[in-house]
Image (tube, rainbow, N blue to C red):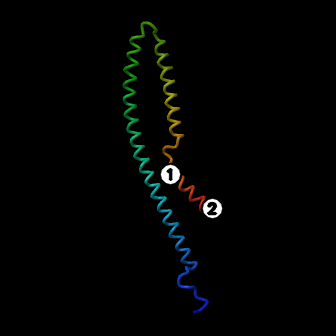
Amino acid sequence: MNPQQPKQGSPGLVSGLVGTAKNMFALVISRIELAALEFSEIGTHLLRLMFASALSIVALWFALAFWCALVVVLAWDALGWKILLILAALFTILAVGCALYVRSVLRQGRLGLPVTMAELRKDRDAIL
């Protein structure tokens, strides 16, 4: 047996690098699959949210228009133009409250791929 030849059972540098490359490729593929799965879930949730929001907005506009007209008609004799000021202030407060709610929902990161990002952080920490 020639001492220059590696043993039959021990892998060489090239085969070790090929194995590492295969593992890295499999890791990248699994992360892409995970991201695709989360993107499809986000798309489904976003579509449902947009549909429900649009329907709610249309219903809200009709409800607000009819209720405001009713309040103005009933209160005009007692308050006059002041009823319009009261309704404007009320709807301004409501709009600010809704905007703050939407901002808090967006800050919670519900649309931000949390599982994929956590896995990518683990991969980065393992590599470094």
Residue 98 image offset from top left, x and y in percent: 49, 30
Q: Which residue lies furthest to the bottom in this view?
A: 1
97 is higher (above) or lower (below) than 88: below
User: Are there few (<14), some (14-19), or many (20+) residues within 10 Å of tag 1?
Assistant: few
**Which residue is drawn at the image coordinates 55% and 75% (left, top)?**
16
Q: In this view, does 7 lie to the left or right of 52?
A: right
- Reply above or below: 73 against 22: above
- Tag 1, which secondary structure? helix
Disc on the earlier residue, 2 or 1: 1
Q: What residue is at 53 percent from the left and 41 percent from the top?
A: 108
* Residue type, mark 1 in image: Val
Q: Residue 64 or 124: which is nearer the viewer?
A: 124
Residue 59 location, x and y as percent? 36, 29
Compared across the picture, whether 3 is left or right of 74 comes to: right
Tell me if residue 64 comes above or below residue 4 in the rendering. above
Residue closest to the far right:
128
In this rendering, the answer to whether 80 lies above or below 19 is above
Circle count: 2
Q: Circle 2 is placed at which residue position?
A: 128
Kind of residue at disc 2: Leu
Give how far apart the Cα atoms at labels 2 and 1 are.
Answer: 20 Å
The spot of residue 55 in percent (x, y) is 37, 34
Closer to us: 72 or 28: 28
Q: What element carries label 2?
A: loop
Residue at 50% x, 70% y: name it. 22
Q: Residue 26: x, y in percent?
A: 48, 65
Disc 2, disc 1: CB below 8 Å?
A: no
- State the residue position of label 1: 115
Classify mark 2: residues with Cα within 10 Å, few (<14), some (14-19) or many (20+): few
